Amino acid sequence: MRYLNLILILFLIACAIAVERTKDLVSAIVIFASYSLVMAILWLILRAPDIAMTEAAIGAGVTTVLFIGVISRTRRMEK
């Protein structure tokens, strides 16, 4: 169980760095959604199912839909 926690935490750190360095906004949103899902798994491992469900629903679900909705309403201005 200790190794699983370590792997998940390392994945969270990698996702955070990848979101910060990604130039494409849609890719950043997908990485952020995976971050939220892994965080929900960690909350389940820590025996906090109520927080895990909230993280999965709001962090991965609603936030992702809102971000994609906002990006779809903007225009790209490329040179």
Image (cartoon, rainbow, N blue to C red):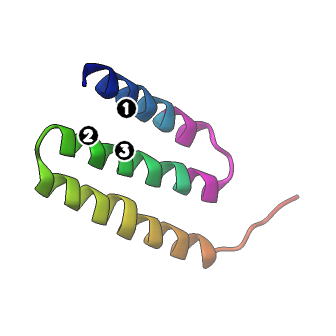
Q: Badge 2: how crowded within 10 Å, few (<14), some, or many (20+)?
A: some
- Picture coordinates of residue 28 (x, y %)? 57, 51
Q: Are marks 2 and 3 in contact (CB under 8 Å)?
A: yes
Residue 53, located in which quarter of the rendered image?
A: bottom left
- Compared to 27, does 5 lie above or below? above
Residue range of the region highlighted in magenta in the rendering: 17-28
Q: Please, what is the dominant secondary structure of the magenta stretch?
A: helix
Quadrant, the N terminus: top left
Name the amino acid type tagged 3. Val
Label placed on residue 8: 1
Name the amino acid type tagged 1. Leu
Q: Residue at x 45, y 55 (%)?
A: 33
Quick one: 35 or 25, which is closer to the camera? 35
| Chain-order first, disc 1 or disc 3 | 1
Residue underneath mark 2: 42
Name the amino acid type tagged 2. Leu
Looking at the rendered structure, the secondary structure element under dot 2 is helix
| Chain-order first, disc 2 or disc 1 | 1
Q: Is residue 19 magenta?
A: yes
Q: Are marks 1 and 3 in contact (CB under 8 Å)?
A: yes
45 relative to 73 in the view: left or right? left
**Mark 1 to mark 3 CA distance (whole Å):** 7 Å
10 relative to 78 in the view: left or right? left
Looking at the rendered structure, the secondary structure element under dot 1 is helix
| Residue positioned most to the front | 1
Residue 6, located in which quarter of the rendered image?
A: top left
Q: Is residue 44 magenta?
A: no
- Compared to 23, does 26 lie above or below? below
- Picture coordinates of residue 49 (x, y %)? 14, 53
